[in-house]
Image (cartoon, helix red, strand yellow):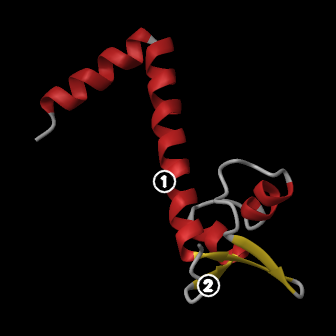
Amino acid sequence: MVNWDDILTAKEASFMLGRNEKYIYMLFKMHSPMILQGSVTIKGNTMLISREGFEHLKEQIEQMEVLKKKANLDNNPIKAKQSNLQEAFSF
């Protein structure tokens, strides 16, 4: 069950995720599996997302970015080597 005591507007949550203000709205309208079921509702003209839904979405985005970064490194051996060198020599 989603806790509706701690909520954000979809617009402010989208900004907090570093995305366009319509990001959560578009995910919701596309029935994206990234959105935690029952964590988004519309009250009047305002879309709301629970804190639990926001944290879930944040984790989903972070995982997606890690996979995207890994895929880019795997497809480009020069970048992968540079990245490994940077990690080896970072203090």
Report the side of 80 relative to 44 (left or right).
left
Q: Quadrant of residue 23?
A: bottom right
SS at badge 1: helix
Cα separation, mark 1 vs mark 2, equals 19 Å
Report the side of 40 relative to 13 (left or right).
right
Mark 1: amino acid:
Glu
Residue in front for this viewpoint, 74 or 36: 36
Taking the view exactly as shown, the residue that stands out farthest to the right is 45
Residue occupying image coordinates x 72% and y 71%: 40
On screen, 12 above or below 14? below
The residue labelled by disc 2 is 4
Q: Position of residue 84 (x, y in %)?
A: 26, 22
The residue labelled by disc 1 is 59
Residue in front for this viewpoint, 73 or 85: 73
Q: Position of residue 63 (x, y in %)?
A: 48, 42
Report the side of 13 relative to 70 (left or right).
right
